[in-house]
Structures are given as C-alpha cells and as structure tokens.
Image: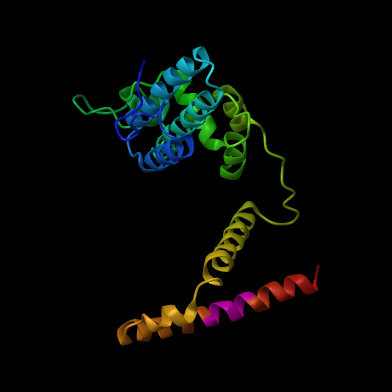
Amino acid sequence: MTMLPDNLPSIAHARLPESYASARKALTECAEIDECKEWADRAAALASYARQAEDDQLEKMCVRIRARAIRRCGELLQEIEPGQGARDGKRQDGDDPPLNRTRAANDAGLSERQRKTALRVANVPADEFEAAVESDEPPTLEALAERGTAKRPQIDLGDRSPEEFAAATKLIGLLGHIERDGIPMDLPLAVRGLSPADAGEMLTQMERIYAWLNQLWEGVAHVYEHR
C-alpha cells in the first residue's frame, strides 16, 4: 500500500478528523509544486486502496486531500507568469529558457492535462471549493475543473468603466476586511499594547485615514442621493 508523506503518519489508523486537519495544514504550507503533486498521487493511491477495502470514510478523506493538493498546485502555478508562446524562443543562444507555468509544471512532473486541471481547480472561488470538497459527496477532480472553466455571469457595468468597477470592487473588499477583522478587535487591549512611538505614528496615520474617510463618505453619499 502506498503511504502518504511522513508528516501525516499512519493515516489509515488515525482518527479521521485529526489526520485530515493535519493534511489541510500541511498542504496550505506547501510551497513546491512537486510536493503537492506527491500528495495528490499518494492520496489517489490510498483512495484506490480504500475503495478495495470498502472504507468509505477513508476514501472520501483521500478524495478531499487530493482535491486540495491539486488546487494548491494550481495556486502555485498561478503565481508564475504564463509563457509568451513563440516569443519565448526569441532569446540569445545559451540563455536558459524562461520560467513559465508550462516549464514549472513539467519540472514538477505534471502532465499537460494535470497542469490544466490544477489551474482550473484553482479558479474555483474559495467558498464554492470549500463547500464542494467538504460536502458528504466530494466531487471528482474533473467536476471541480469543470466548475473552474464555467463562464461566470456577465456583470452589467452600466455607465461605469472596467477600471472604475475594479476600483470599486477593491474598495468594497477593503471595507469588508475592516468590518470583519477590525471592528471585533479589542481596542482597549490593543491600545494598552502600544508604545509611545507606536502611538505617535498611529496618530499620524489616523489623521490621513480620517481625511480619506471624510472624502469617501462624501463621495458615497453623493452616489446614494442620486441613485
């Protein structure tokens, strides 16, 4: 039987929630494509063993691990600039070929199909991926990849330019982050932890932020009044 990596020992005999939590953490920290591929390959092998042994829970856990490993492969590939096709060959003799997604995938041992699948799975929105993978019947890689290639509904920009829409989306995300992570913060506790130098720097920052918020408030109010 093919075993999973050493940092997930005796997975077939461990309690599933603990083993799966360890796998998720390890995969999140993976920084090498070939390491993620190894996770995916071993999870696939163990899933096959689980099917033969009629161990439904172990098989589902391995399917989830494999999906996460493939997604992590895709995320790492997305951090690399795509190749420029024929233009990649226009370099002086003796130069190393430029690093692109295809070369990185090849170096890690991924086939063309695996590379495309990984990138498509990485395209699935995080919340949608989590819901699917953690469901009672986790989908196959093929089904996840299909979700990653599905066309998203076209957004009606109205009289807004794409640049304006992108900037507005970024602004909404920023305010959402502040509301989600900043407002629940224990401010008295955090303030007590400031040094005098920290406090002085923060006062300067808050002056700039206060002016920025005033400008934002006036702008948003104007849009709301003329809706």
**Viewer-proximal residue, 3 or 132?**
3
In the rendered view, does 53 fall on the left or right side of 92?
A: right
Task: Kindly identify the residue that appears in the image at 36 percent across and 15 percent down.
Answer: 1
Residue 174 occupies quadrant: bottom right
Task: Kindly identify the residue that appears in the image at 31 percent across and 35 percent down.
Answer: 7
**Magenta span includes 214:** yes
**Magenta span includes 43:** no
Horizontal and vertical percent position of residue 152: 68, 38
**Viewer-proximal residue, 204 or 29?**
29
Whether 219 is drawn above or below 27: the answer is below
Horizontal and vertical percent position of residue 102: 39, 26
Residue 134 occupies quadrant: top right
Whether 167 is drawn above or below 98: the answer is below
Which residue is at the far left?
Answer: 94
Q: Main secondary structure of the magenta part?
A: helix
Which residue is at the far top?
Answer: 52
**Viewer-proximal residue, 90 or 138?**
138
Q: Provide the residue span drawn in magenta.
A: 210-216
Horizontal and vertical percent position of residue 207: 48, 84
Horizontal and vertical percent position of residue 49: 45, 15
The answer to whether residue 104 of the structure is visible from this angle is yes
Whether 116 is drawn above or below 151: the answer is above
